[in-house]
Image (cartoon, rainbow, N blue to C red):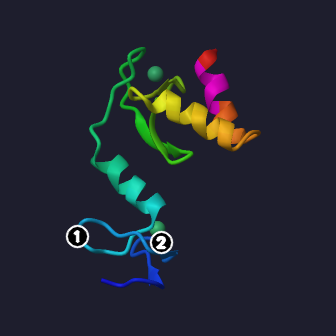
Amino acid sequence: MGLFGEHCVRCGKKTREETPEGLPTCEECQLQLQAEREEKRTCPLDGSVMSKEIVQNIIIDRCPSCGGVWLDSGELELVKKAMEESAGSDLATAMVLGMMR
Ligand SMILES: [Zn+2]
Ligand SMILES: [Zn+2]
């Protein structure tokens, strides 16, 4: 197990994180892996399979046809927190504005 200077096996970025299997993998790529493992959701409005997106380190489901966003319980709080921490973050702001439409 390396301590410093490991490089993410997926994106090559320097990281000290690793998967439970012991592969050096940065936080973003671990989230990506987690998103891929999560069950796909279908849009409650039009039944399209929603795609996983990572915003502010939170995995969200977004419908490709109507643009609707699904958050798991607790994720809205994470989004709010992320917004408070990075006031003016365009992504988080756009996301929450989109949800309130
Ligand atoms: Zn990576
Ligand atoms: Zn939809």
Magenta part of the chain: 95-99
Mark 1 near ligand 1 (CB under 8 Å)?
no
Measured in 3D between alpha carbons, the distance from the residue under mark 2 to the one under mark 1, in whole angstroms, is 17 Å
Instruction: Tell me if mark 1 has few (under 14), some (14-19) or many (20+) residues whose alpha carbon lies within 10 angstroms of its own.
Output: few
**Amino acid at circle 1:** Glu
- Which quarter of the rendering shows the N terminus? bottom left
Quadrant of res 96: top right
- Badges 2 and 1: C-beta atoms under 8 Å apart? no
Image x and y of residue 78, in percent: 51, 35
- 19 horizontally vs 82: left or right: left
Q: Is residue 39 above or below residue 44?
A: below
Asked if one can make out residue 62 in the rendered structure from this viewpoint, the answer is no
Residue sitting at x 31%, y 74%:
23
Q: Is residue 97 magenta?
A: yes
Image x and y of residue 27, in percent: 45, 61
**Residue on which disc 1 sits:** 21
Q: Which residue of the protein is positioned furthest toward the right in this rendering?
A: 88
- 85 horizontally vs 71: left or right: right
Front of the two marks 2 and 1: 1
Q: Which mark is residue 11?
A: 2
